[in-house]
């Protein structure tokens, strides 16, 4: 069980899904800050 879990974790790390998720988080943060600045100027 543990060996298969380790292999799954290692193979799941470099997948594009993980990179896309991290990019989505960064993009959401930038969008949130932009909206905050937009509300502050109004």
Image (cartoon, grey):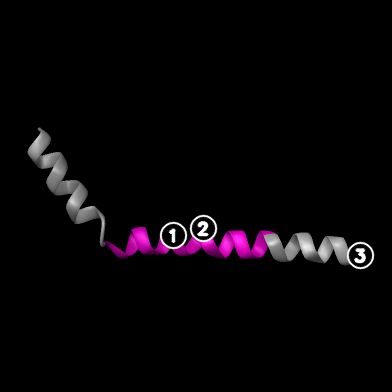
Q: Residue at x 69, y 61 (%)?
A: 33
Task: Give the residue displayed 84% in from the left and 61% down from the top.
Answer: 39
Q: Inspect the magenta stretch and tell me whether residue 20 lies in it.
A: yes
Q: Are marks 2 and 1 in contact (CB under 8 Å)?
A: yes
Q: Is 22 drawn above or below residue 1 in the view shown?
A: below
Secondary element at tag 2? helix
Residue 25 locus on image (x, y percent): 51, 58
Q: Is residue 28 magenta?
A: yes
Q: Residue at x 18, y 55 (%)?
A: 11
Front residue of 30/12: it is: 30
**Image position, residue 1 (x, y; %):** 10, 32
The residue wearing badge 1 is 22
Gap in angstroms between the C-alphas marked 1 and 3: 31 Å
Q: Which residue is mark 2?
A: 25
**What residue is at 44 percent from the left and 59 percent from the top?**
22
Crowding near the residue tagged with mark 2, few <14, some 14–19, many ≥20 C-alpha atoms within 10 Å: few
Disc 3 secondary structure class: loop
Q: Which residue is mark 3?
A: 42
């Amino acid at each position: 069980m543990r060996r298969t879990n380790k292999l799954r974790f290692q193979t799941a790390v470099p997948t594009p899904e993980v990179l896309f998720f991290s990019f989505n988080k960064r993009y959401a943060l930038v969008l949130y800050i932009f909206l905050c600045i937009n509300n502050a100027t109004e």
